[in-house]
Amino acid sequence: MKPSLRHIQLPGRVRLQFAEQGDGSGTPVIALHGVTDSWRSFEPLFGHLPPDLRVMAISQRGHGDSDKPADGYRPADFAADVAAFMDAMEIETAVVVGHSMGSINAMRFAIDHPTRVAGLMLAGTMPWFGRPPELRAFHRDAIVPLADPVPEAFAREFQQSTLARPIAASMLDGFVAESLKVPAHVWRAAFAGFITDDFSERLREIGVPTLVVWGRRDSFCSAPEQKALLGLIRSARLVEYADAGHAMHWEEPQRFARHLSRFATSVADRAAIAS
C-alpha cells in the first residue's frame, strides 16, 4: 500500500497537507511529526502498517507543504489544528502518535480535548523540553539567530543529531529537504513554543492508554526524563530501544510500526469491550 496525499482547509485556520493510508472504517491513527519535519517523517512506517489502521500523518502548520502563517506555533495552537482536522474529517476519537515536538502537541491535545483521544503513543519525548539547560541554550544560541534562507548545513546537522546510527543517505537527504521548506520564523516560533510553554504538571490529567517509546541513545531525552513522564502520566508504560536515538522511527521503522499497530489494536479492543 502507498499513502494518498491530500490537502484540507481547516475552517478559519490553515490549509494542511496530510498522507492517508488504510481502511477508511479502520481505527483512526493521527501522526504528528517533530519540529521542521513533515508527514514524510512517518513515511518509513507506511509499508509496515496493516491496512486495518486508518493512518493520517499530518504536515503541521508551518511545515512541509502546509500553510506557514506568521504566528500560531504554541502547542495549544497545534492541538487546536488537530481538533479542527478531526472535525473536518468527521473523526470522533483517534489514537494520536507524536514524535518530539509532535509528542508535546499530542499531550497538549489530550489535555485540551480529552474525549477525542483514544490512546497516545509518544516517541522521543519528555514532560517539558525547556527543562534541560542544554536545550534552552541550543534554542537561545542556534535557533533564535536563524534567518532566511536557513543554511542547508545547519538543517543537515540538526537532523543528523537525532540519529544514533546512520540511515540511508537518500532518506536523510529527504528529511533535510523537508526541513529546508520551513522558514526561519517557524523554526524560531515552533522551538519557542515547546521550550517556553511548560504545562508538565497538567500531564497528570491524562488518563488514556499511553505508550512511551524511548531510544536509550537519545541525545535530547534522558532516562530521568522518561521516569518523570511515567510519574506524571499514570496510564503510561515505557518501551526502550536499546540502540536507537531520538528518531527511532527512522532507525527501526519496522519495529516502531509493529509497536504502533499492536498499541492501536489494543486501544480499539479495549474501547470495543467498554462499549
Image (spheres, grey):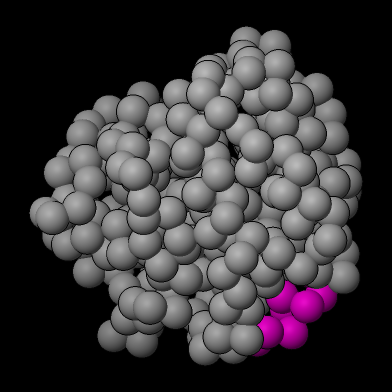
Give the left or right position of residue 10, taking residue 157 as reference.
Answer: left
**Closer to the camera in the image, 103 or 89:** 103
In reply to whether residue 184 is colored magenta, the answer given is no
The image quadrant where one finds the N terminus is top left
User: Residue, x 69% and y 62% (percent of image)?
Assistant: 129
| Quarter location, residue 168 | top right
User: Residue, x 72% and y 75% (percent of image)?
Assistant: 229
Q: Vertical placement of 97 versus 207: above or below?
A: above
Residue that lies at the very extreme toward the left in this rendered image:
11
**Closer to the camera in the image, 33 or 67:** 67
Range covered by the magenta-colored residues: 226-234
Q: Vertical placement of 34 versus 173: above or below?
A: below
Q: Vertical placement of 158 versus 115: above or below?
A: above
- Image coordinates of residue 260 in percent, x first then y, are 55, 53
| Quarter location, residue 3 | top left
The image quadrant where one finds the C terminus is bottom left
- Image coordinates of residue 182 in percent, x first then y, are 47, 30
- Image coordinates of residue 40 in percent, x first then y, are 47, 30
In reply to whether residue 230 is colored magenta, the answer given is yes
Q: Main secondary structure of the magenta part?
A: helix
Q: Vertical placement of 81 versus 244: above or below?
A: below
**Residue 187 makes an appearance in the image:** yes
- Image coordinates of residue 250 in percent, x first then y, are 66, 33
Give the left or right position of residue 92, taking residue 160 as reference.
Answer: left
